[in-house]
Image: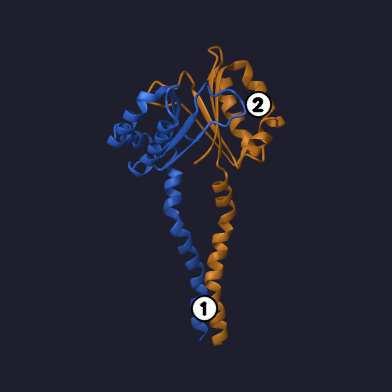
Chain colours: A blue, B orange
Amino acid sequence: MKKIIIALAALVPVLAMADHHKEAPAAKKEAAATFRHVVCFKFKEEATPAQIKNIEKEFAALKGKIDTITGLEWGTNVSPEDRAKGFTHCFIVSFKDLAGLKVYAPHEAHQAFVKILKPILDDVFVFDFVAK
Amino acid sequence: MKKIIIALAALVPVLAMADHHKEAPAAKKEAAATFRHVVCFKFKEEATPAQIKNIEKEFAALKGKIDTITGLEWGTNVSPEDRAKGFTHCFIVSFKDLAGLKVYAPHEAHQAFVKILKPILDDVFVFDFVAK
């Protein structure tokens, strides 16, 4: 009977580790994804709210269409400072590395997005960095 | 003896949960930290490499000096496109919310940093958003 108790007690850290390992792949993927592609948009005055909403939706949807995207978040400018130079939208797309971006840029899903973006785009700011 | 085994067996999920909860505060903090303060710098031509290195070091050090910063990452531009408008450095500072930024902006550590930055700063781009 003692053996069973010992065996059960020994299971505790093993099960705790199993729980931990279950979460490891996602965490590892996130930790390795340090390439940030920062993209800001300024739309033309004639761009309609519906067109802009569509751009937001279609950009966010790229995450499900291009495998090398490890993260994608975005929002509109809420800075109390006036230093956004007229840009109203910012998207941060994450990749594992530059190779991930190089799959994304010419990808047909991205190219289809660019096609609907261009007619209403006034200016774009793009900054890529490897996060330290 | 059976009772002891049952009690031990009951402990297994409790301990597994305890292990999970141990990690929860950091994960929760990260999940709640959705306010992104994106700051890009373009330095004056006369800025020396040593001065720029110091700015990198001092900005990164703010993370340890201002409590409301939940994340800080940065890097220099490596974009294959030429759309960074001359900006060479990008820092993304994360906060839980706008209130976090409002503690950061006037904080003496941030103000001391701005003091060493200003003389060598040519242009700055600031974009804040709540990450969707």
Q: Position of residue B107 (x, y in %)?
A: 70, 32
Q: CA distance from mark 2 to mark 1?
A: 58 Å
Tell me the SS state at disc 1. Answer: helix
Dividing the picture into quarters, in which one does residue B59 lie? top right
Residue matched to label 2: B113
As drawn, the residue found furthest toward the right would be: B108
- Callout in the foreground (2, 1): 2
- Number of numbered tags placed on the structure image: 2
Q: Quadrant of residue A80?
A: top right
Relative to A35, does residue A8 appear above or below in the rendering? below
> Where does residue B56 sit, x and y in percent of width and height?
56, 28
**Residue B98, image x and y in percent?**
62, 37
Residue B117: x and y, percent? 62, 21
Q: Which residue is mark 1?
A: A6
Amino acid on which the number 2 mark rests in the picture = Phe
Amino acid type at image mark 1: Ile
Q: Secondary structure at mark 2?
A: helix
Other-residue count near label 2 (Cα within 10 Å), few / some / many at <14 / 14–19 / ≥20: some
Residue found at the very far left of the displayed protein: A108
Front-most of A76 and B79? A76
Residue at image location 51% in from the left, 67% down from the top: A13
Picture residue at 67% right of the left edge, 41% below the top: B67
Query: Could you classify mark 1 by the number of other residues whose Cα lies within 10 Å: few (under 14), some (14-19), or many (20 or more)?
Result: few
Residue at image location 36% in from the left, 39% down from the top: A62
Front one among A58 and A74:
A58
Occupied quadrant, residue A129: top left
Q: What is the chain letter for disc 1?
A: A
Instruction: Name the side, left or right, on which B67 lies relative to B129.
Output: right
Subunit ID for the residue under disc 2? B
Instruction: Tell me whether marks 2 and 1 sit on the same chain.
Output: no
Q: Nearer the viewer, residue B10 or B33?
A: B33
